[in-house]
Image (cartoon, helix red, strand yellow):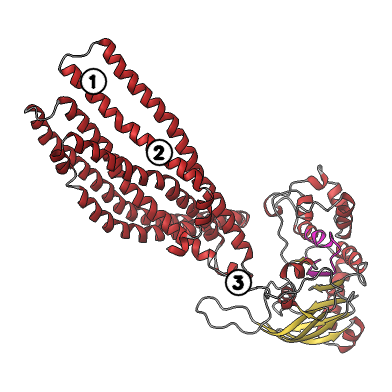
Amino acid sequence: MMNALKLIKPYIFERRFFIVAGIACLIIVDFMQLLIPRVIKWAIDDLTLWQVDASGLWRYAVYIIGIAVVMGIFRYCWRLCLIGTSRRVEEGLREALFNQIQTLSAPFFAQLKTGDLMAHATNDIQHVRMAIGMGMVALTDAVVLGTASIGFMAYINLKLTVLAVIPMPLIVFGTRFFSKKMHRMYGRVQAAFAELTEVVRERLAGIRIVKTYGREQDALERLRSQSNTYIDLNIRLVRITGAFFPMMALFSNLSLAVVLWVGGRQTIQQTITTGDFVAFISYIGLLTWPMMAMGWVINLIQRGRASLERIDKIMQRRPTIVEADDARPLTKAAGQIQFSEVTFSYPAANGDEPTPDVLTKIDLTLAAGQVLGIVGPPGSGKTTLLNLLPRVFDTGKGRIRLDRHPIESLRLKDLRKQIAFMPQEPFLFAGSIKDNITFGSARTDAAMLWHALQSAGLADTVRGFPHGVDTVVGEKGVILSGGQKQRIALARALLEPRPILVLDDPISQVDTETGAAIIHGIRQLAGRRTILIASHRLSAVSFADQIITLQNGRIVEQGNHDELMQNGQYYAMTHRLQEIEEQTVKN
């Protein structure tokens, strides 16, 4: 728990002035509340003794109005300071969590669901905010208002005060008993909420597939099942908190019953005045809130603690892809690439058996400005090979060098700045075409943007849209076809003249004619940029200086187009089949 508290300590320290000011204002409000029963006592005693007239009652009313005005002003101030502080902590914690998530490596995201991360960034942080903001308020009230109320009650009658506070030790024991149970249940409830969030997110993200296959009822049943689990856990939690809060109210009402019985007799016997008795009852009423606040504080703190511990588990994770302490900077690479005995297998999931090698002893050298084509059947390791260059994953064995430097010895940010990457599955954000291509870069001008679109074979299509490059593509590019999405992703990779261009199946979703135009544009970059292309359509790589064929993670063929065609193996057979298919389509 102490490690988790370190997450919010910097934000609390930064806002320490506002916290002190807010607590000071809250204490003033509490003491103002304590004055009101005194004014009521004076008024009732004067009425009982027939020592007050209309002007005197007006004076007491003005006192109460004045106290209320002061309370209103300082209540505004403490809410601004304390609740404002909790909002700032919420903001800082959410930014820190998001920043931490961005530093983590690819294996982390394979292990944790998006719904979990969404729950951490929303529900968990909200509970931490409540524990800090209203938790401070309720705790201050419980200490200050409770202690001061007992002090004023003791001033009126010590014996009656002792009898009134007898139930309080029972509150301590009850609180300790219930707090442990609440903490455990809050953790389980938060985990169930994360799972429910993931179910909703996944079904909404795949709503078109759900509707196409008519699986709406199945999706609803899956949601209903997880929702029932979440509700069942919440009901079990309510059974605990539902017993806790009535217990607090019971002890408060026991105190009130004692005061009515004993204090009422003392008033009849004139041991205390009627005004004292009414004031004492008022202080019991004020004391009820601190007693209830104590329960609320425990509730807030346990919920916030469970959430903070869940967030801390994410914050304690460390990226598996890290740069060395003495990593060297790299301003601009020439583009020479070398794979030496590279073997790779994906990290095993928690407790699972090690996964088999996806790549085995990959050896190849690519001079600056050359083009490498990578072909092979599905699952042969093409995408994995491309992902190793920008260190999406690190090699298990062997070494990759860029300009004769091991890529692990380079600063990670500098390494990735040298590489323009187009993934096999293009991802588009719910912004405009321009935003998706430029990625918010302020250095991009209109000429660069249209040149990238032209190279990706998309310029004429975009000109046909009513809003051109400002057309909003919707979530994941919903208004675009698969080929258009792919070409936007390609334009993104072609936008900046980075020394290395990595393309994973760049023409898989376009027709032959469009694909030929795209490949023609890529060929113009040969000699100026080092290019790595993985493709199932061999026409995309036939111009490459060097082509490798991967099968089961091993290089089984290597050479240029003419050499591989003479070998008569996978490349040659596949190339001839694809030529026949393309010719058939044309006819």
Please identify the quadrant where the N terminus is shown.
bottom left
Give the image location of residue 173, x and y in percent.
23, 56
- Is 491 contained in the magenta span? yes
Numbered label attached to residue 43: 1
- The residue under label 2 is which amino acid type? Leu
> Is 264 above or below relative to 51?
below
Range covered by the magenta-colored residues: 489-508
Depth check: 461 or 187 in front? Answer: 187
Instruction: Determine the secondary structure under disc 1.
Output: helix
**Residue 473 in the figure: left or right of residue 223:** right
- Residue 231: tell me if it is visible: no
Q: CA distance from mark 1 to mark 3?
A: 72 Å
Numbered label attached to residue 26: 2
In the picture, residue 466 is in which quadrant?
top right
- Is 211 contained in the magenta span? no
Give the image location of residue 451, x and y in percent.
89, 56
Q: Circle 1: is it few (<14), some (14-19), or many (20+) Cα within 10 Å?
A: some
**Residue 293 in the figure: left or right of residue 474:** left
**Residue 298 in the figure: left or right of residue 435:** left
The residue pinned by badge 3 equals: 107
In the picture, residue 419 is in which quadrant?
bottom right
- The residue under label 3 is which amino acid type? Pro
- Residue 453: tell me if it is visible: yes
Give the image location of residue 93, x and y in percent.
54, 54
Camera-side mark, 3 or 2? 2
Chain-order first, disc 1 or disc 3: 1
Chain-order first, disc 2 or disc 1: 2
